[in-house]
Amino acid sequence: MTTDEISSKVGTHGKWIGDFALLAFMTLLCVGALELGIRILRPQKPSWLPTYKSDPVLHWVNLPNHEWAIDVGEAQWTIYTDENGFRVGKDGAIRRNLPAVLWLGDSFAFGNAVDYEQSFVGLLNAERPPRYSFLNAAVGGWGPIQYRQQLEILLDKGLQPAEVFVATFVGNDFHDCVYDKNIPVRDGILGVDAGWRSEVKLRSQLYRVLSNFYHRHAKVPMNFVQNEFEMAQPSNWESGLLRQARNRYREEFEKIARVTREHAIPLTAVIVPSKQIVDAASGKTIAHPSEIQSFQPGFPVEVAKTIFQELGIRYIDLTDSLRAEPTERTYFRFDGHWTPQGHRIVECTILAARPDLVAL
């Protein structure tokens, strides 16, 4: 290669590098300008939940006396908690002059993605004339072990509920019994790492705009997650992780039943199905690998019902009621929790099974 050819190649590469550097600079400049413009002209609500604190027994609990507004595109909602970390409405009022009905559970019972007044516990509290005060002691991400521990802690503190309800989400509550729950809490956020991606999600207003737009308009495939594929195959429950999970699930609800019996408190379990389970119950075809011999999406519901029957625990299965409406109306597409319409159906189902929960 001649000197002229080498010089030409170096010049070409140098120009390419220069053009790339200029493009990168202009991109960063535009992103920075958009970020600044959004912050000044239309600041975005946060899209995460800094609503937790670490706990030596329960791993994490709701922050007490906390307020936080969230916008995830398809849902905008606000959290208020009282001094106990229980979810309450904006006014924070609890009917202390009425017998208390305690609700335990995870994010479905807590009411993720809707305001308290739209959640089924909030709707129960809004019934008139009131008969009970419904206490929402649920915490997102918990499982049956934490439900039982929370119950024991509250009873030890002197709470004397007239009745206890446990909402169990069969989409992951079995696995929650065997998975490690020692998840760190940083700045009130559960499980967030210290990487740059998390920082972008937490700090960037532009990211929130793009994320919210995607959540509003993108199509979501009707797919099972891996855990649900495993649970939809009855043979998987005969050994391994799912057998261990089922046994521990049963043990925890047996303990919950024992504790409530010792305190003469009626107990009811409420079976919460996933969107995919409801879709399958409605007759929608759920795609699955062809090599699976027996695929029963609703099988986790049947496992839970069998356990409750064996333990003599009264239960309410929400599946049939929820399948009366398209899941597009009752479950948020990305968030996966119930919409206000879903919560209304849940409240109606609970009251149909237990009309005595409101004034007779």
Image (spheres, helix red, strand yellow):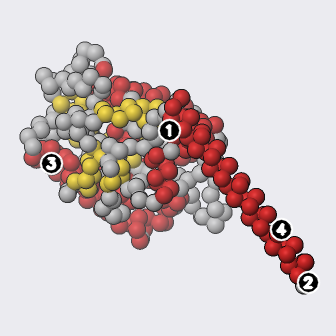
Residue 145's image quarter? bottom left
Q: Amino acid at mark 1?
A: Val
Query: Which x, y percent locates residue 100?
Result: 18, 31
Q: Amino acid at mark 3?
A: Ile
In three-dimensional space, the C-alpha distance between marks 1 and 4, rounded to whole angstroms, equals 46 Å
Choose the circle earlier in sequence order: 4 or 2. 2
Looking at this rendering, what residue extends furthest in the bottom direction? 1
Q: Disc 1 vs disc 4: which is toward the camera?
A: 4
Q: What residue is disc 3 on?
A: 153
Q: Which quadrant of the figure contains the N terminus?
A: bottom right
Q: Disc 4 vs disc 2: which is toward the camera?
A: 2
Residue 119's image quarter? top left
Q: What residue is disc 1 on?
A: 72
In three-dimensional space, the C-alpha distance between marks 2 and 3, rounded to whole angstroms, equals 83 Å
Q: Are marks 4 and 2 in contact (CB under 8 Å)?
A: no
User: In the picture provided, is 186 more to the left or to the right than 70?
Assistant: left
Q: What residue is disc 4 on?
A: 12
Q: What residue is disc 2 on?
A: 2
Q: Quick one: 48 or 57, which is closer to the camera?
A: 48
User: In the picture provided, is 167 more to the left or to the right than 360?
Assistant: right
Q: For residue 208, which numbered disc appears in the image?
A: none
